[in-house]
Image (cartoon, helix red, strand yellow):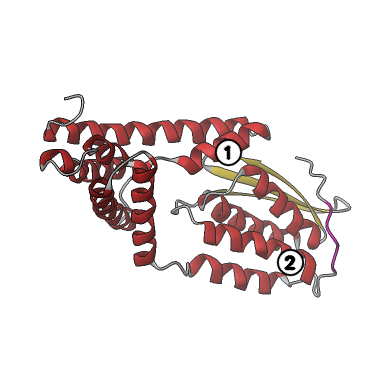
Amino acid sequence: MTNNLTITETAIPEATTVKDVCLFLTEYSAWLLGCGTTCVRLEKNVTRIARAYGKRVDLTIMPRHVHISVWELDGSDFVTSVATIRKTPISFNINTRLSELSWRIAESGLSLDEARRIFNEIVSSDSQNKWLVLILVSLANASFCRLFGGDAYAMGVVFIATMAGYWVKTQLLGKGFDLRPTVIICSFISAVLGASCSLFSLGTTPEIALGTSVLYLVPGIPLLNSFSDMLYRYYICSMSRFFDALVITGCLSIGLCSAMFLMKAGMF
């Protein structure tokens, strides 16, 4: 792939081999894709790093793997490496810090050893407070309930339903559970709790509480990334992300409909 990105070249303080650069870029790409970046952002970051180390790079991005080839500028040597994309939760924190690392390498002339040390620190220490994230996600979903016209009772129920479902989600994913059954379980739990307004005749908008209790599970980032990849002609990755989002949406619907049937709410 070609890239017209222009950066300010900075001399790297020590020589780097094609193999070392290729292995670093492969691991870097696997993590960056795993935490939720778009294909075009990955291509720009990888190209920026390779140019900083005086190398030329081509990469092929597939739904589950990334294939990287690194050349010397004169074509005297090249190495190819393939890595499986990391299965990690989407993290804007890691995504942003890895992108910042690519600029530090390009502008500050970091050695490859130093870049690798910083990279390992980034991927091994996500500074997010899990309890704070839990509360913020719950507040955000309660706010969505209000935006859709929910009253105070509905907002309170949605807050509790989101907190319970999101906590279960983090626990299951942390133990290695597959995302699809996890979404079914979490949407079922949240929808059962979300039906409390209808069950106990709380407030005047029980249907809004039920409908918005599972919104935190909607795969918005995969859908947005799919659209971005389509615009930049990464069609295979775009379709893969789109179908992954459809599957997750279907799992969400299964859990929601099961809860509605159990609680005798809504269409049932």
Residue occupying image coordinates x 67% and y 43%: 40
Q: Position of residue 52 (x, y in %)?
A: 79, 62
For label 2, the crowd category at 10 Å Cα-Cα, with few meaning under 14, some 14 to 19 and many 20 or more, is many
Q: Position of residue 18 (x, y in %)?
A: 75, 59
Residue occupying image coordinates x 54% and y 61%: 94
In space, the residues marked 2 and 1 are separated at their CA atoms by 26 Å
Residue 209, placed above or below residue 7: above
Instruction: Give the camera-side residue of 12 and 246.
Output: 246
Instruction: Kindly state the secondary structure of the residue where label 1 is placed.
Output: loop
Would residue 152 be found to the left or right of residue 43 on screen? left
Instruction: Give the camera-side residue of 194 and 224.
Output: 194
Check residue 182 for magenta coloring. Answer: no
Would residue 100 be found to the left or right of residue 127 on screen? right
Query: On the rendered image, what quadrant is the N terminus found in?
Result: top right
Q: Position of residue 101 (x, y in %)?
A: 66, 65
Which of the labelled discs sits on residue 62, or is there none?
A: 1
- Give the residues in magenta: 6-10
Would residue 28 be found to the left or right of residue 54 on screen? left
Residue occupying image coordinates x 61% and y 53%: 29
Residue type for callout 1: Met
Query: Count of labels shown?
Result: 2
Q: Which of pointers 2 and 1 lies earlier in the amino acid sequence?
A: 1
Q: Quadrant of residue 187?
A: top left
For label 1, the crowd category at 10 Å Cα-Cα, with few meaning under 14, some 14 to 19 and many 20 or more, is some
Q: Quadrant of residue 218?
A: top left
Residue 125, placed above or below residue 91: below
Instruction: Kindly state the secondary structure of the residue where label 2 is placed.
Output: helix
- Identify residue for label 2: 105
Residue type for callout 2: Ile
Instruction: Give the camera-side residue of 221 and 22.
Output: 221
